[in-house]
Amino acid sequence: MHSYHVPVLLNESIDGLNVHPKGIYVDATYGGGGYSEIILKKLSGGRLFAFDMDEAASALLPKSRKFFFVHGNFKFIKNYLKYYGIEKVDGIVADLGVSSRHLDQAERGFTYRNMAPLDMRMNPGSNITAEKVINEYDINRLSGLFKTYGELRQADKLAELIADKRREKKIETNMQLIGCIKAIVPKRTENQFLSQVFQSLRIEVNQELDNLRFFLQSTVELLKSGGRLVVVSYHSLEDRIVKNFMKWGKIDGPPQKDVYGKWTSPFTTVTRKPVMPGEEEIVNNPRSRSARLRIAIKK
């Protein structure tokens, strides 16, 4: 299972979920099934529902009457669970990272290290690709996504270089993209800069932050009192959303106050500070380096 995606902070996440043998749980990002595998071992009369947008994830599923796989976006978690007659669950875990399999398959276009088409779709059936974004978005929209999703100070110049190059020839591969922006790629921090560029495109193509917001908001209604929400994020944009949601129960706007003027939240945070991988895990799985785990309990 783990060849598809090496589960990050696995033991810490499962411990945070506090699995009850007869409980109902959700693995919102199935991937290679690392979290699901351990959860199933802890269930005797309970059920586990696993979600993944990529149909390839369904190639390796556990054979268990306790296990249900949903080929769909976790933003629609509430609707899918309602189809199964599930109104409340005991715990939800989500690993927001791109799977190791996606990164290692050059044809998916998630990495800037090998020649690849500008794709970046987690759901191969989606009609928007990184190529479409690069070649069809106007210059202001391009600049905006580099600023917002990549937090790049050179966002305006990036958009200008891309717009100039695509007038000459359509940009179809990651190497073409890198070639047209190389004039402003800093040599000392080249990998970080390119990571931020590609992160921007990936988030836009997959609408990752919007999906995350929808998903988190659904958990308020789905989780039972005492239910656990466990989320592993990989960059500051995700982590900020998760942190604020667990603290205040809201994505945007000021937190709510009760009749006495005190701030209220539907959650109690277990992790005041995020849990991060230890040195051993980082050595064994360098991609875990940026992972941040947060846990909250539904009141």
Image: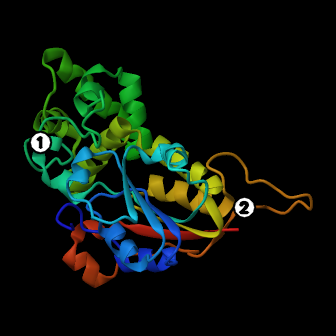
Q: Is residue 224 visible?
A: yes
**Residue 211: which disc?**
none
Would you say 253 lies left or right of 112 here? right
Q: CA distance from mark 1 to mark 2?
A: 43 Å
* Residue at the disc numbered 2: 265
Quarter of the C terminus within the rendering: bottom right
User: Is residue 7 shown left or right of residue 262?
Assistant: left
Q: As drawn, is 152 to the left or to the right of 102?
A: right
Disc 2 residue crowd, few under 14, some 14–19, many 20+, Cα 10 Å: some
Compared to 272, does 290 lie above or below? above
Residue 95: image x %, image y %?
39, 61
Q: Position of residue 222 (x, y in %)?
A: 60, 56
Residues at circles 1 and 2 in contact by the CB criterion of under 8 Å? no
- Residue 71 lies, in percent from the top left, at 34, 45
The image quarter in which residue 298 lies: bottom right
Is 141 above or below relative to 5?
A: above
Q: Residues within 10 Å of mark 1 (few under 14, many from 20)?
A: some
* Residue at 25% over, 61% down: 32
**What SS does tag 1 mark?**
helix
Instruction: Give the secondary structure at mark 2.
Output: loop
Q: Residue furthest top?
A: 167
Q: Give the position of the N terminus as an image quadrant.
A: bottom left
- Identity, as a three-letter code, of the amino acid under mark 1: Glu
Query: Can see residue 190?
Result: no
Residue tagged 1: 107
